[in-house]
Amino acid sequence: MPIRPRPFTYRCDECGWSATVAPVSDALGPNDIHHRCGNCGNPALQRGTPSRLQALIATLKRDLGGRPPGM
Ligand SMILES: [Zn+2]
């Protein structure tokens, strides 16, 4: 049984933007990688541990195929 990596959070120190991703496997997909801040474009993003709620939301999004419910 493959081990799923833990979700992690990208954070921008410039503006406070953050994004949490929950990779499906050890191989990160295009949706799992952020090279720049989604708000201000800062390329120096920090990678850190998400809060429990952020991790839960990211995991649910992944398990739903990245689509919001009802679509
Ligand atoms: Zn930013």
Image (spheres, helix red, strand yellow):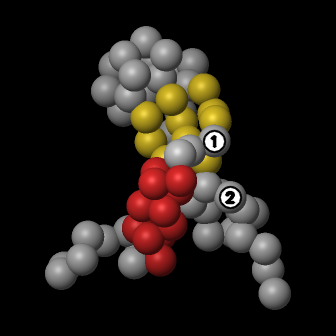
State the residue at coordinates (53%, 46%).
51
Image coordinates for residue 31, horizontal then vertical, percent: 48, 55
Residue 14, placed above or below residue 65: above
Left-right relation of 25 to 10 = right
Task: Name the image quarter holding residue 41.
Answer: top left
Do labels 2 and 1 touch, CB within 8 Å? yes
Q: Position of residue 18 (x, y in %)?
A: 43, 34
Q: Residue at x 44, y 71 (%)?
A: 60
- Residue 54's place in the image compared with 65, above or below, is above
Does residue 15 appear left or right of residue 26 in this picture? left
2 or 1: tag closer to the N-terminus: 2
The residue that disc 2 covers is 6
Residue at the spot x=31%, y=71% of the render?
67
Q: Amino acid at mark 1?
A: Thr
Viewer-closest of 28 and 15: 15
| Quarter of the image with the C terminus in it | bottom left
Q: Residue furthest top?
A: 14
Say what amino acid the circle numbered 2 marks. Answer: Arg
Mark 2 vs mark 1, CA separation in Å: 9 Å
Q: In front: 52, or 3?
A: 52
Q: Is residue 30 above or below residue 64?
A: above
Q: Residue at x 68, y 58 (%)?
A: 6
Secondary structure at numbered mark 1: loop
* Residue, disc 1: 49
In the image shown, does 60 or 33 lie closer to the viewer?
60
Instruction: Give the image quarter of residue 48.
Output: top right
Label 1 crowd bin: few (<14), some (14–19), many (20+), radius 10 Å: some
Q: Is residue 19 above or below residue 42?
A: below
